[in-house]
Image (spheres, rainbow, N blue to C red):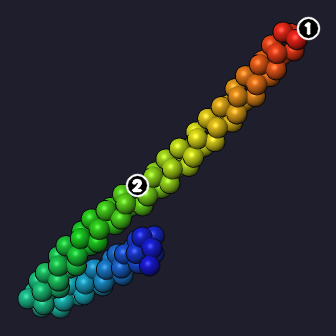
Amino acid sequence: MTLQDTLDMLKKRKTHLDKIIAKLIYEAKVKKTSNDKLGALFCLKRKKLYESEIEKVNDHCRTLELQITTQQFEKCKKNEIAHEKIVFDIFSNKIKKQKTKTKKQKKKQKKK
């Protein structure tokens, strides 16, 4: 399971918890209108519990997003280093060719 899969799973969990909270709010309103204040109070307490769970999920999501970003940055950095090495090799090969050409030209001039 990749980090992205875990992040998607946590986002689904958050939406599920949001739905549960919405149901609890509706249930608390219904209980309050039917004069069941104690039942409404318990619904609101459970709502608060689920909200704290959402905060934990959000924190975990932020951590995963940071890890994903760090991985992408490291991949880019590796690609950049590889690109710089290739460019360096190309230029060093060009310089070597130029040096050999100039040596050959100097040898030809000396022979004349």
For label 1, the SS is loop
Identified at 78% across, 18% down, the residue is 102
86 vs 80, left or right, is right
Q: Which quarter of the figure has residue 61?
A: bottom left
Depicted 102 relative to depicted 65: above or below: above
**Residue 48 showing in the rendered view:** yes
Q: Which quarter of the figure has residue 36?
A: bottom left
Q: Residue 16: horizontal and vertical position, in percent?
A: 36, 81
The mark lying in front, picked from 1 and 2, is 1
Q: Residue 2: horizontal and vertical position, in percent?
A: 45, 73
Q: Which quarter of the figure has residue 98?
A: top right
Identified at 61% across, 35% down, the residue is 88
Q: Residues within 10 Å of mark 1 (few under 14, many from 20)?
A: few
Q: Residues within 10 Å of mark 2 (few under 14, many from 20)?
A: few
Identified at 42% across, 61% down, the residue is 68
The disc, 1 or 2, on the residue closer to the chain's N-terminal end is: 2
28 vs 81, left or right, is left
Depicted 13 relative to depicted 67: above or below: below
Quarter that holds the N terminus: bottom left
Q: What residue would you read off at disc 2?
A: 70
How many angstroms separate mark 1 from mark 2 (CA)? 63 Å
Q: Residue furthest right?
A: 112
Which one is in front, 49 or 102? Answer: 102
For label 2, the SS is helix
Q: What residue would you read off at disc 1?
A: 112
Q: Residue 56: horizontal and vertical position, in percent?
A: 23, 71
